[in-house]
Image (cartoon, helix red, strand yellow):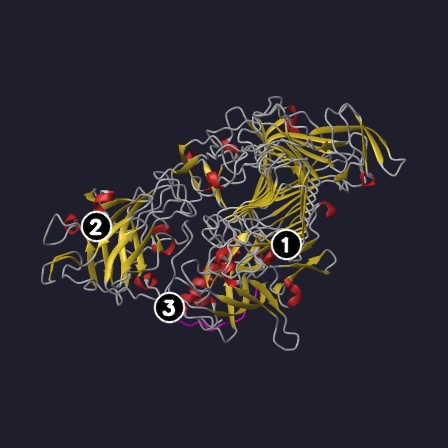
């Protein structure tokens, strides 16, 4: 190896350090990681290739096979501002089918110990736009705990010639000991090799090509040359990540030079030079902007409100009769400043407020003459700020390249004002409160330090970690759950030797035992003990499955952590069942947002799969009369067994649902009822079942019964203080199939009133900001998002198939900004809506579900709460399926019973959701990925319609309702001839009054093969009703092949 003397000594010392820790393998035993195309895929236990690719992120990584060339195969890793990519060195297939042993892995020995070899070597090319911060780099992650290695910048002594090229393959040699950190000293259990991005501050991120990747004890010689950095070619855009992503440097604070122009230094700069009563602040009177001082600095304070921010005015503020400037703010000469050639805007800042994913402190400029132009809005975080984010308790420097503020339309000439912005009317919490000091522009970059304005960096000091209460995962804060956080009197039991902890069985006090399945433990639970566990925390693998008898387990919360795996399974060939009961009480002192009580998966693998029961919607062959104990069903009921339960919907007719005082004006009783089967006679063409008890009500022939017995039951115990919920968020797996979920969900149809909390600004527990002590400013009475079955911003394709979901006080199945297949479920008694597609970005199919309404809900439409609740409090009225957008196919669903408003509803108002982005989740149409709803609509000729990507086809309802299909806020282009298509719908209303289809603020639809019927003689049903269309010429709807049967009015309202 040819090295300059100083570098040679450094590498020798590092290699000696490596060897002192772990003796390397024989120098001839190289470990090939990626040599050819086949190495890009997991190998089975016989060395055969399986289909699973060894990507860390398949969206950005691909394997390139040079089958027609002598050149070696390589990996192509196109990072983005949000994502790195690389190679996974992990087990890719294990489960019950392999007795929980690793069956397919990306290495002969997954999770290797890198220090058993001296060096990681490979050849690489890289392209991108690099500067002193953005450089190609590599890092490792550990299996568990998920430590991060030291990050190695790919230049200097590590690279042949000193730097990588975009045209020439360069050899990279990295001593494996260089990856060690104080936390991860042995580099054991390596899970991933990451070729890293540069973050949200850069519009162009590195693209790597990598080949011949291996571990070795005998590195090749490389020629080391000095590192030369490429200049920055493009300005960096505003970061979007509110959490810190950049460590402070150790460079001392800035010393002013001649290229430094103070904008605001002291209270003298509050006003024009000529007149102390003439302010230089934007909205000074409205926001009561005032200057003050503390021990470190003079500063001014801007407390923004929902409607206005504040800032600094520039240039002339008053002219005389001859148009000469007589009162001026910065730059004090009567002229509007020109920053088109300036380098950086800098200041010191503190910040207070209730910050969220959508509310962050920002700054912008206006100017450029009239009409005024606006600059880019820069979020005050990430690479622009000391330690990556502002706080309330210390001054931190902000440093913004002026180029980042420029737009294609304005180069920052003729500045009018600098604005510190509010978060607007949509933000419910405290608005940003800025304290700002030492505002200036400069042509000399100021290195960010850890604690401005001191003359040298201060050491980061962490508060007592036991004071922390919450950790941030994906999109929300969750209570810390660890052995040292257990309530007084609770016991923490740890699984060992792949077994359920035996010592827990002597625990007799209910709700005071926590079982922890740590990473690396694979436990099968097949018991039926009587313990009521407080929590079960799964970081390894837990399978709940019968072996020789029925299984039951009772707990307050089952928590599946990222990387953990919870399987609840039954065997198709066995009659044994599993019952999981949730029995617990919310503790608002440690869980004010009510995340716990239920089954919660924070990026874990949640897999609940019961036995298939076949057809779940069973048609009545004869009318059932009150007092009868038998039900005659058509032959499709063959899978029923004695002891099974069916639910019969309310089929009563003639209810006056349109009356203003319904149901109080009549003696209304919901007539939904259950039949537990005691006998089955299948000797005829139909099946006659006998119920354990006589039925109380009539049920009409042709209606259906829902089969709701499953081999797995997840149920809130009748003794539980609070109801459970099932939630998955982030990565992992989310499959819930053939499971009965009963009495789940806590959110009700009352007005949403969520708890509001924010981090304590006076405490800090680590520089990543992901652990905090949360302070509650408002305790809510109806917490949002605690639904029966809920995919909450899931990053994986979920499946809800064949389940029975019974009696939820708000929503049954919920896909929130998630792609979920919601198919063949029976949903009974969800008061708000049976199926809720919450954000409009949901793309998974909703098909072949049977929904039984029981008359619950507020009975009100969505407009009543839409504006005052900022679009968050929707689908409360009583619906079967409610959709916020038009991207998901809604196919062949059927609704019966009684719905407070409508079996089907689409509310596609653009407010609050038009900027939401469709995630890149497997199965998502590539034409939608990464785009907002408004962008998707703008790309389609005629705009976004139901049939563009989704569709409303083959759906039916035979029920009591106010509206059969409720269609709101569908936009149409001028001269639109088709609009959204409603195809193959059958809508039969059992009520005395109501509407078949109702449209609001929509212009045109096409109905194809649609049937709208009344049932009661002399009803007052209107088949199609049209309401306000914002002064457009109403054409709603265009009618193709439509049948109107037994309705009083064909078209009403503005049709």
Q: What is the CA distance from the residue labelled 3 to the residue labelled 1?
A: 39 Å
Above or below — where is 689 with respect to 885? above
Crowd around label 1: few <14 · some 14–19 · many ≥20 (10 Å): some
Instruction: Look at mark 1 in the image and give the residue it sits on.
Output: 110
Q: Comparing marks 2 and 3, which lies closer to the viewer?
A: 2
Measured from the top left, where is residue 829 in percent x and y? 63, 33
Residue 407: quarter of image = bottom left
Mark 2 vs mark 3, CA separation in Å: 35 Å
Specify few, some or many for label 2: CA neighbours under 10 Å numbering under 14, 14-19, or 20 or more: many
Secondary element type, mark 2: strand
Determine if the magenta segment contains residue 219: yes
Q: State the residue lying farthest toward the bottom.
A: 69
In three-dimensional space, the C-alpha distance between marks 1 and 2, rounded to whole angstroms, equals 61 Å
The residue at the point 24 percent across, 48 percent down is 283
User: Which numbered disc, 1 or 2, marks the residue that appears first in the sequence?
Assistant: 1
Q: Mark 2 vs mark 3: which is more N-terminal?
A: 3
Tell me whether circle 2 and circle 3 mark residues in contact (CB < 8 Å).
no
| Residue found farthest to the right | 683
Q: In this view, which residue lies farthest toward the top? A: 508
Q: Which is in the foreground here, disc 3 or disc 1? A: 3
Magenta residues, dominant SS class: loop
Q: Which mark is residue 281?
A: 2
Q: Earlier in the sequence, mark 3 or mark 1?
A: 1
User: Horizontal placement of 70 versus 374: left or right?
Assistant: right
Callout 3: helix, strand or loop? Answer: loop
Q: In the rendered image, which residue does mark 3 sit on?
A: 232
Q: Is residue 324 magenta?
A: no
- Name which quarter of the figure residue 717 lies in: top right
> Magenta segment range?
216-228
């Amino acid at each position: 190896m040819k090295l300059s003397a100083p570098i040679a000594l450094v590498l020798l010392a590092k290699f000696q350090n490596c060897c002192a820790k772990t003796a390397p393998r024989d120098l001839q035993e190289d470990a090939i990681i990626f040599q050819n195309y086949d190495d890009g895929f997991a190998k089975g236990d016989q060395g055969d290739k399986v289909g699973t690719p060894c990507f860390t992120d398949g969206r950005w990584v691909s394997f390139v096979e040079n089958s027609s060339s002598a050149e070696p195969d390589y990996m192509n890793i196109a990072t983005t501002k949000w994502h790195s990519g690389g190679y996974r060195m992990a087990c890719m297939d294990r489960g019950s089918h392999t007795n929980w042993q690793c069956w397919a892995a990306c290495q002969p020995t997954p999770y290797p110990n890198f220090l058993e070899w001296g060096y990681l070597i490979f050849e690489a090319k890289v392209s991108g736009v690099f500067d002193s911060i953005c450089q190609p780099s590599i890092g490792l992650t550990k299996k568990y705990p998920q430590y991060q290695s030291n990050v190695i910048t790919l230049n200097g002594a590590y690279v042949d010639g000193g730097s990588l090229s975009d045209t020439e393959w360069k050899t990279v040699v990295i001593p494996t000991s260089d990856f060690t950190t104080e936390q991860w000293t042995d580099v054991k259990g390596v899970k991933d090799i990451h070729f890293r991005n540069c973050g949200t501050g850069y519009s162009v991120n590195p693209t790597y090509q990598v080949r011949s990747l291996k571990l070795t004890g005998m590195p090749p010689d490389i020629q080391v040359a000095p590192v030369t950095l490429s200049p920055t070619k493009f300005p960096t855009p505003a970061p979007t990540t509110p959490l810190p992503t950049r460590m402070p440097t150790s460079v001392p604070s800035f010393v002013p030079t001649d290229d430094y122009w103070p904008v605001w230094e002291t209270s003298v700069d509050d006003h024009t030079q000529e007149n102390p009563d003439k302010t230089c602040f934007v909205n000074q009177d409205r926001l009561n902007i005032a200057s003050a001082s503390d021990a470190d600095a003079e500063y001014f304070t801007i407390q923004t409100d929902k409607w206005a921010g504040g800032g600094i005015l520039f240039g002339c503020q008053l002219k005389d009769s001859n148009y000469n400037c007589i009162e001026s703010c910065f730059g004090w000469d009567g002229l509007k400043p020109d920053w088109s050639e300036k380098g950086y805007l800098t200041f010191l800042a503190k910040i207070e407020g209730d910050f969220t994913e959508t509310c962050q402190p920002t700054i912008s400029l206006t100017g450029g003459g009239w009409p005024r132009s606006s600059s880019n809005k820069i979020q005050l975080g990430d690479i622009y700020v000391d330690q990556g984010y502002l706080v309330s308790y210390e001054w931190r420097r902000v440093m913004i390249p002026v180029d980042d503020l420029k737009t294609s339309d304005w180069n920052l000439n003729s500045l009018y004002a600098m604005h510190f912005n509010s978060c607007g009317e949509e933000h419910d919490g405290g608005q940003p409160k800025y304290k700002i000091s030492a505002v200036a522009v400069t042509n000399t970059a100021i290195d960010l330090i850890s604690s401005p304005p001191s003359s040298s960096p201060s050491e980061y000091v962490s508060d007592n970690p036991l004071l922390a209460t919450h950790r941030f995962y994906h999109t929300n804060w969750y209570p810390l759950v660890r052995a040292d956080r257990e309530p007084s009197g609770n016991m923490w039991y740890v699984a060992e030797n792949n077994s359920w902890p035996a010592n827990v069985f002597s625990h007799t006090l209910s709700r005071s035992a926590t079982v922890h399945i740590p990473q690396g433990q694979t436990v099968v639970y097949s018991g039926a003990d009587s313990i009521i566990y407080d929590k079960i925390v799964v970081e390894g693998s837990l399978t709940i499955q019968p072996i020789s008898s029925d299984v039951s387990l009772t707990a307050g919360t089952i928590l599946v952590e990222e990387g953990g795996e919870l399987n609840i399974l039954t065997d198709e060939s066995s009659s044994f069942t599993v019952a999981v009961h949730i029995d617990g009480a919310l503790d608002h002192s440690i869980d004010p947002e009510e995340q716990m009580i239920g089954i919660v998966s924070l990026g874990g693998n949640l897999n609940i799969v019961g036995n298939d029961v076949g057809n779940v919607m069973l048609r009545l062959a004869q009318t059932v009369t009150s007092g009868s104990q038998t039900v005659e069903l058509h032959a499709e009921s063959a899978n029923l067994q004695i002891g099974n339960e069916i639910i019969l919907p309310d089929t009563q007719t003639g209810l006056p649902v349109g009356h203003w005082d319904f149901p109080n004006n009549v003696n209304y009783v919901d007539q939904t009822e259950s039949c537990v089967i005691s006998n089955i006679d299948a000797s005829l063409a139909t099946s006659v079942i006998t119920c354990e008890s006589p039925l109380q009500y009539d049920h009409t022939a042709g209606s259906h019964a829902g089969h709701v017995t499953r081999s797995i039951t997840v149920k809130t115990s009748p003794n539980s203080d609070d109801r459970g919920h099932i939630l998955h968020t982030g990565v992992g797996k989310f499959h819930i199939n053939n499971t009965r979920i009963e009495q789940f969900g806590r959110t009700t149809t009352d007005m949403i009133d969520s708890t509001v909390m924010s981090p304590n600004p006076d405490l800090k527990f680590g520089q990543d900001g992901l652990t905090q002590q949360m302070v509650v400013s408002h305790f809510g009475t109806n917490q949002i998002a605690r639904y029966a079955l809920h995919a909450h911003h899931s990053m994986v394709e979920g499946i809800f198939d064949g389940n029975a979901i019974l009696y939820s006080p708000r929503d049954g199945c919920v896909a929130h900004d998630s792609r979920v297949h919601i198919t063949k479920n029976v949903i009974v008694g969800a008061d708000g809506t049976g199926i809720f597609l919450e954000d409009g970005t949901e793309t998974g199919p909703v098909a072949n579900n049977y929904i039984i309404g029981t008359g619950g809900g507020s009975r009100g439409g969505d407009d009543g709460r839409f504006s005052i609740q900022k679009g968050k409090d929707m689908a409360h009225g009583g619906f079967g399926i409610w959709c916020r957008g038009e991207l998901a196919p809604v196919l062949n669903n059927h609704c019966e019973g009684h719905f407070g408003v409508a079996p089907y509803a689409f509310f596609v108002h653009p407010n609050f959701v038009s900027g939401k982005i469709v995630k890149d989740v497997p199965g998502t149409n590539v034409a939608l990925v990464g785009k907002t709803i408004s962008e998707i609509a703008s790309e389609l000729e005629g705009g976004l319609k139901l049939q563009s990507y989704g569709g409303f086809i083959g759906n039916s309802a035979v029920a009591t309702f106010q509206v059969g299909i409720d269609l709101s806020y569908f936009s149409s282009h001028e001269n639109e001839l088709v609009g959204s298509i409603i195809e193959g719908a059958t809508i039969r209303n059992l009520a005395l009054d109501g509407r078949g289809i109702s449209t609001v603020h929509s212009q045109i639809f096409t109905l194809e093969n649609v049937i709208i019927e009344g049932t009661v003689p002399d009803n007052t049903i209107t088949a199609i009703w049209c309401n306000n269309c914002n002064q457009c010429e109403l054409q709603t709807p265009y009618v193709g092949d439509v049948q109107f049967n037994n309705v009083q009015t064909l078209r009403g309202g503005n049709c």
